[in-house]
Image (spheres, helix red, strand yellow):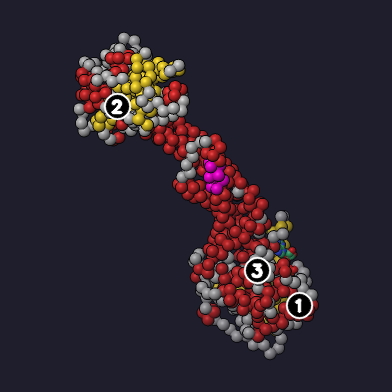
Amino acid sequence: MLELVDVHRTYLIGESTVNALRGVSLTIEQGEFVAIMGASGSGKSSLLNILGLLDNPDKGEYRIFGNNVNTMTEDEQAGVRNNVAGFVFQQFHLLKRMSIVENVRLPHIYSGVKGDFHQQAVERLRQVGLAERIDHTPNQLSGGEQQRVAIARALVRDPLIIFADEPTGNLDTKNSIEIMKIFTALHAEGKTIIMVTHEPDISAYADRIITMRDGVIISDERKPGFETTVVAKEENGFDIHGSGKASLWQNGRFIGFIAQAFQAILANKMRSFLSVLGILVGVASVIAMIALGEGAKTAMQEQMKSMGSNLLSIRGGSAKIRGAAQGAGAVARFTFIDVDEIAALHTLVKSAAGVVTGSGRIVYGNKNWSSSLNGVGYDYGTMRASIPTVGRWFTREEIQTREKVAIIGVTVVKELFGSTNPVGKTIKINRINFTVIGIAPAKGFSGPQDDDDVLIIPVNTAMYRVLGKDYLSGIFVEVSSSTLIEQAKSKISALIIKRHRLKEGDDSFNIRDMTEIQKMLSSTTQTMSLLLGSIAAISLVVGGIGIMNIMLVSVTERTREIGLRKAIGARKNDIMLQFLVESVGLTISGGFIGVLAGIGISLVLSYFAGWAVKTSLISVVLATVFSALIGIFFGLWPARKAAELKPLEALRYE
Ligand code: ADP
Ligand code: MG
């Protein structure tokens, strides 16, 4: 069954070499109970580790069920350990964070077999007399009890062979006898037992005693009357090359990894919290930043809406110096005929309204106030969202007949009327009596300019009665749809050039659309977001390095645990996944707290500072995905480091 031919094993310690095994040849058959005896340092453990596939020979051949070990991959060997071997160590190697029943069922996680393994684990614990203690942790058990748990664990996969290295080395006589009774019973059931010991009382339980000295076998004695039964490989019911594979979803393996990851995270709460602080701060600032940006954008859009949508503003003069002609350039003087012709561009233009601007000195009672005066056409009201909510808009007749009616902005109301209702009152504008018919809707500030410090009167009244102008200052045009803005601009431009007999490219007038202003504003906010975004990115990277650091610590701390897991059959990917799940668990938890903190910060900012904020779902989802990616990216190296550990070296790590 197990066959060693001239096996050598040499350890390198710095410059010197230790020849632990120097040509061992040995055959062990199914059903044997073998004790390997010898003085300390004679190579017993080295031999057992090679037999148990925890280590491989440097020279010589080892065949297990006829398969040459040298041709097996690490994962295949892990599969064989899981399927046919059970290990019992002098130091027990139980995982302290888990209950004993979880410890016992552990090899099943890596088995790729389906079934109710909790029940089997309980059954095995009953077999070693610990059925009542299943919920206890290893620390609550005595040494003898711990070793019995380890034996139950070795049995849970129903292995053909049990490898035991000084199983009673840490136990008193009474407990040693208990353990040996269990071994004897297992042997009677037909299990092959290979046990290292240096105590003759213990080796007396075996029926074959191999004695070693200085890396070679010096005697090999069988008790008389023993017969071996040869079991062919096929009858063992396992496939060495297939045993390297197992689905991630079987046996609740993935769920198991998640549970273990959170156990590990919670076992070091403070440390975990500190290590995710970078991620937390990064995510919180991203969330708060995006919420602020979105809030500002919404506020801006609201303001844009109050200016009117799809709006073009046509003014005389160069675009560079607003309203003033440059050098010899003339200023186009618009008339109502221009307005009518533009309004007649039906498919492109929804409506057009002439405006004339100036300033008005308003007197009411003993108070007076100056504000900007807009003489406007009928369509201006809807176009620029200026229809009063208190009072009413002008009628077409009032505009035609130069009626002395006025609509005033809320700042004007506040300055002149305080809290009394101005509608129906008479005011003087540049010494002419006007009746107030409405209050313009509040618009707030655009830049330093108070858009509510306005006075709106009919355009004809403004031109001929108040300002004494016979031309318009500009024309507002509402384009039928936002997709037609460019087209409308060129059409209107051509029309004006033709009507006023201007040269092509003349700068005596300019057409601006609100999207330009919008673009300008959003480019400022974009710069801001970029800046804040890079700060957030830096803190996330720093946070990621923090995670990598803590994961490296975690791998080092748990080297022996990794060794144990590998010994009972964990493959590289299993170990890698376990640590990746842990680092992703860390970063996602950090990200989650960060999201909450970010939302909290935005709420505080909006509540106390009055800033507009709007937390977007996208930013929350993105932050979570991003923190998971950081976990994968920065967890990969520590996880690989863990996965690459050799089982034996990891088990021996101090
Ligand atoms: P035993 O179990 O009989 O006490 P071992 O097989 O553990 O002996 O060790 C045999 C020799 O190999 C000893 O000299 C020991 O120091 C050495 N040795 C064992 N394992 C290692 C190792 N991993 N690295 C270096 N030397 C080792
Ligand atoms: Mg030893």
Q: Is residue 245 above or below residue 439?
A: below
How far apart are the alpha carbons under marks 1 and 3? 23 Å
Upstream in sequence: badge 3 or badge 2 = 3
Q: Indicate the quadrant where residue 56 lies.
A: bottom right
Q: Nearer the viewer, mark 2 or mark 1?
A: 2
The residue singled out by tag 3 in the image is 99
Marked residue nearer the N-terminal end (2 or 1): 1
Q: Which mark is residue 176?
A: 1
Ligand 1 placement by image quarter: bottom right
For residue 539, which quarter of the picture? top right
Q: Is residue 406 above or below residue 40?
A: above
Number of residue marks: 3
Q: What residue is shown at x 34% (from left), y 19% (from top)?
A: 434
Q: Nearer the viewer, residue 115 or 153?
A: 115
Three-letter amino acid code at the position of disc 2: Phe
Q: Residue at x 62, y 56 (%)?
A: 265
Would you say the magenta stretch is mainly helix, strand or loop? helix
- Say few, some or many: other residues with alpha carbon within 10 Å of mark 2 (under 14 / 14 to 19 / 20 or more): many
Pick whichever, 176 or 482, lies toward us. Answer: 482
Helix, strand or loop at mark 1: helix
Q: Which residue is mark 2?
A: 394
Q: Residues within 10 Å of mark 3 (few under 14, many from 20)?
A: some
Task: Work out which quarter of the rendered image holds the N terminus and state it.
Answer: bottom right
Magenta residues (range): 595-603
Image quadrant in which the C terminus is located: bottom right
| Vertical placement of residue 332 versus 347, above or below | above
> Taking the image as drawn, is residue 130 in sight?
yes
Instruction: Kindly check if marks 2 and 1 are in contact, taking CB atoms under 8 A apart as contact.
Output: no
Q: Is residue 597 magenta?
A: yes
**Of residues 562 and 318, the one drawn nearer to the viewer in this rendering:** 318
The amino acid pointed to by label 3 is Ser
Instruction: Determine the secondary structure under disc 3.
Output: loop
